[in-house]
Image (tube, rainbow, N blue to C red):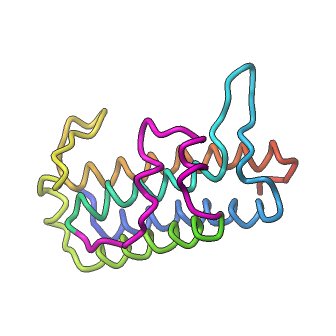
């Protein structure tokens, strides 16, 4: 793989900073509100933040053999989990945001201990990255960055739907 782990780590962190800016903009808003657009119900900010934490835990921490961040509610935000299930079983907004921060910190710290050769190793979750036809840790990290970027875009729409200027 021709990427450096430090560059990809920096991209991952830069993407998270945008998410954090949207979280700040949502203070005082109903973060549980799932908006509907053209008859399609969108995920709430609450679900998106929980899902991004779940994904980073799987795609970075577990996939790269990092330490468990000890965030108990992650399982309620995985693929196929519903907004209602996360509301019924998930943490408060404050605990969610703190867990989101903690998972990211653990992921950043773990990646900083690894070298570029790690990117060529197979991920530890035995998962082939869609569109990249690879099980490498590098492909998994790239997928995490693009997955989170996509959901950060969703947060941007939610901010706008709450009547808040995005940037």
On the image, the x and y values in percent for residue 146 come to: 44, 47
Indicate the quadrant containing the N terminus: top left, top right, bottom left or bottom right. bottom left
| Quarter of the rendering containing residue 38 | top right
Q: Residue at image x 19%, y 60%?
A: 119
Q: Residue at image x 50%, y 69%?
A: 99
Indicate the quadrant containing the C terminus: top left, top right, bottom left or bottom right. bottom right
Name above or below for residue 123 compared with residue 114: above
Q: Residue at image x 26%, y 49%?
A: 139
Left or right: where 17 falls relative to 5: right
Left or right: where 2 falls relative to 154: left
On the image, the x and y values in percent for residue 57 come to: 36, 60
Name above or below for residue 50 compared with residue 44: below
Q: Residue at image x 42%, y 40%?
A: 79
Residue stretch rendered in magenta on the structure:
66-92
Left or right: where 96 falls relative to 133: right
Query: Is residue 90 within the magenta segment?
Result: yes
Q: Residue furthest front?
A: 88
On the image, the x and y values in percent for residue 83 come to: 59, 41
- Nearer the observer, 85 or 54: 85
On the image, the x and y values in percent for residue 142 come to: 34, 51
Query: Is residue 162 within the magenta segment?
Result: no
- Nearer the observer, 112 or 23: 23
Number of marks? 0
Q: Residue furthest right?
A: 163
Left or right: where 18 falls relative to 79: right
């Amino acid at each position: 793989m021709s990427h450096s782990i430090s560059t990809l780590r920096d991209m991952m962190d830069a993407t998270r900073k945008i998410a954090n800016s949207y979280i700040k903009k949502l203070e005082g808003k109903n973060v549980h509100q799932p908006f509907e657009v053209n008859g399609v119900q969108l995920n709430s900010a609450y679900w998106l933040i929980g899902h991004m934490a779940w994904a980073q835990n799987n795609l970075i921490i577990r996939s790269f053999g990092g330490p468990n961040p000890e965030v108990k509610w992650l399982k309620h935000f995985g693929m196929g989990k519903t907004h209602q299930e996360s509301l019924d079983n998930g943490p408060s907004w404050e605990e969610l945001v703190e867990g989101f921060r903690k998972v990211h910190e653990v992921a950043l710290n773990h990646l900083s201990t690894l070298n570029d050769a790690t990117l060529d190793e197979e991920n530890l979750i035995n998962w082939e990255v869609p569109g990249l036809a690879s099980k490498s840790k590098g492909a998994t990290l790239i997928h995490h960055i693009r997955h989170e970027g996509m959901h950060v875009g969703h947060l941007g729409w939610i901010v706008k739907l709450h009547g808040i200027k995005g940037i």
